[in-house]
Amino acid sequence: MNPPAGDGTISALRGTLIFCRDDPFLTDPGKAFVSEPDGLVICRDGMIQAVGPYAALKAELPPNADVADHSGCLIAPGFIETPMTAPITAEMKQQFISLTPIGRFGEPRDIAAAALYLASDDSRFMVGQIISPNGGFVI
């Protein structure tokens, strides 16, 4: 499934979320990960725009926006090219890339595509699964 290309499409996914606020390699993992029992992921044109508590983010949704329930599924990404991974040294980054069969870090749109899939009707039979867009890198 390819994310929409530049048409302003907004997708929203509501449910229990566990996500990284900070890099768990540079921060105490107990503080890096956040659990939000009533969370919301908002995507525009296939790119994640906001992640956080539903109550705090619902005002960012346009009127009549469809909000899909993720049914207990989880996205567990590999290394993604973001400001969170920017502090990783070039040497360490190359080590991770050498252990990743696809040979590169992921891009934010790789994760957005997984979120869009979970938000779509195509995932209607997915319950309690972990989707791991990771380029083949597994710990």
Image (cartoon, helix red, strand yellow):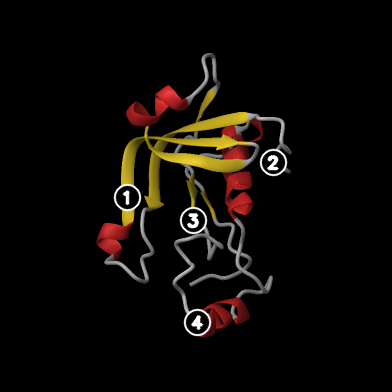
Give the mark nearest the N terminus, 2 or 3: 2
Q: Which residue is mark 3?
A: 76
Above or below — where is 62 with respect to 20?
Answer: above
| x and y percentages locating residue 38 in the rendered image | 34, 33
| x and y percentages locating residue 67 in the rendered image | 51, 25
Residue type marked 1:
Val
State the CA–CA distance, disc 4 to disc 1.
25 Å
Give the mark nearest the N terminus, 1 or 2: 2
Q: Residue at x 27, y 66 (%)?
A: 28
**With 74 as the anchor, is 98 left or right in this view?**
right
Element type where label 4 sits in the image: helix
Q: Residue 72 sits in which quadrant?
A: top left
| x and y percentages locating residue 45 in the rendered image | 65, 37
Q: Residue at x 26, y 61 (%)?
A: 30
User: Disc number at residue 92?
Assistant: 4
Whether residues under marks 2 and 4 lie with C-beta atoms below 8 angstroms apart, the answer is no
Q: Which residue is mark 2?
A: 3
Above or below — where is 69 with respect to 138?
Answer: above
